[in-house]
Image (spheres, rainbow, N blue to C red):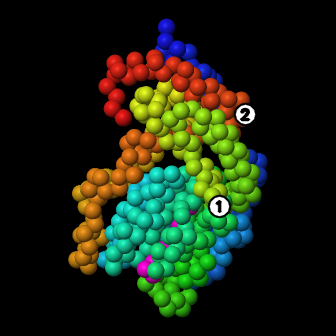
Amino acid sequence: MPNLALLGGKPVRSEMFAHDNSIGEEEKQAVIRVLESGNLSQYVGSWNKDFFGGPFVRQFEKDWAESSGAEFSIAVNSNTSGLYACIGACDIGPGDEVIVSPYTMTAGAIAPLIYGAVPVFADIEEDTFCLDPKSIEANITPRTKAILVVHICGHPTEMDEVMSIAKKHNLKVIEDCAQSPMSTYKGRKVGTIGDAGIFSLNYHKHIHTGEGGMITTNDPVIAEKVQLIRNHGEAVVEGKKTKDIYNTFGFNYRMTEMEAAVGIEQLKKMPELIEKRISNANYLSKILGELPGIIPPVVKEGCKHVYYQQTFKFKKDIVGVARNTFVDAVKAELPLMKLRESTPIMGVGFAPPLYLQPIYQQRLHKCSFNCPRYDGQVSYEKGLCPVTERMYYEEVFTHEYMRPCFSKRDLETVINAYEKVYQNLDELKEYEAKNTVTV
Ligand SMILES: *Cc1c(COP(=O)(O)O)cnc(C)c1O
């Protein structure tokens, strides 16, 4: 009879983990107040005081500005919309290049394409998985207009170096903070260091409103442009007497009053939710980091990691089995989380290198890389970003067992699962030898 659950043995735990739910009575009452007001959204797409949205949206923006330390906060209906709006607000267009990360959620590379510009992929650092300033610099050309950094998994990018490169080459810096609210770099909050920052409020982020996003900036020009892009700017600029109208034609990126009402309550809970994540992650890193061949997340000096997920590196040569086999074995010991049955909270690789997607491989866009105004030679070849590829195909695995809902007992179960797999590595090696697993 095998011991490991992957091979038919009894799992460490079968009772499901609790649903990680931070939505409570406060959010419920807030939404009821909106419903009772009868105005579920108060935006008007023309120059009018309601161009800026209703009272809940405006309050949420005010609260976010206070907590983020940014001068302006602009609510949108997703981080994706926020990324697009910020690219537009930085006056990016056909013929321009934007340096992006290949190791992130897909929208971070598509954003330049929306405005006809070309995403250029730089490689990542192998300890934090954020863009490597050396690779950013190596990818700068006369066409580069901006750097879109992503504070990935909850750890900030090396912003001092990024900002000095940007200054030297006169580039804008946009920070994708979707995975890193309240993360700090040398005492400064992410989203306030570059020209603009964007946060996500979708349901698997630190706090959520269903869907939603928030842009932060200290630059009044960018603030005005993203407001115009958010809400049909072309119909507004005349009445508003805006002079600099480049890229200010609009979309509908407006957040509803209900989402804003939820966001106001969620924002109050955010510090506590994040501290719980950090303390769970620290505990798991300490114990799991003692297992040979498992390298827990690095936290660089002067940085605050807020653990969107806990990202480990796996050394196959030390453990003696492939990463994917190991992760399958740990996962099999543990139950799923209630209401998250379709998205396991442990996985391998994180994000496939974005440049390998068909849209880049086949250059399927009539402007951007095929634009007559583009005279560069961007590459999307396999092998382009070797660190990213090694992390994705060989070394990285992630889990979310540090989520705020995990109790001390839950964490002990998780540790037991990892330890059980280590105690039964021989069984796993034998299984692997019989099954052709390559990674
Ligand atoms: C979640 C996420 C996004 C997209 O956020 P939405 O609000 O779903 O549009 C973008 N970038 C990163 C790094 C993310 O994690």
Q: Is residue 426 left or right of residue 55?
A: left
Give the residue at x 58% y 80%: 219
Reply yes or no: does residue 175 show up in magenta: yes
- Asked whether 212 or 432 is in front, the reply is 432
Q: Position of residue 224 (x, y in %)?
A: 56, 81
Q: Position of residue 347 (x, y in %)?
A: 48, 38
Q: Amino acid at mark 1?
A: Gly
Reply yes or no: does residue 41 show up in magenta: no
Residue at the spot of label 1: 302
The tag earlier along the polypeptide, 1 or 2, is 1
The kind of secondary structure element at disc 2 is helix
Residue at the spot of label 2: 408
Is the shortest distance between ligand 1 and the CB of mark 1 under 8 Å? no
Q: Is residue 42 above or below residue 294?
A: below
- Asked whether 235 or 141 is in front, the reply is 141
Place residue 101 in its image quadrant. Answer: bottom left
Task: Report, in whole angstroms, how far the alpha carbon at label 1 lies from the one at label 2.
Answer: 28 Å
Give the residue at x 63% y 52%: 306
Magenta stretch bounds: 169-178
Decide if residue 340 is in sight here.
Answer: yes
Give the residue at x 54% y 79%: 222
Q: Which class describes the residues within 10 Å of circle 2: few (<14), some (14-19), or many (20+)?
A: few
Look at discs 1 and 2 and give the one toward the viewer: 1
Contact between marks 1 and 2 (CB within 8 A): the answer is no
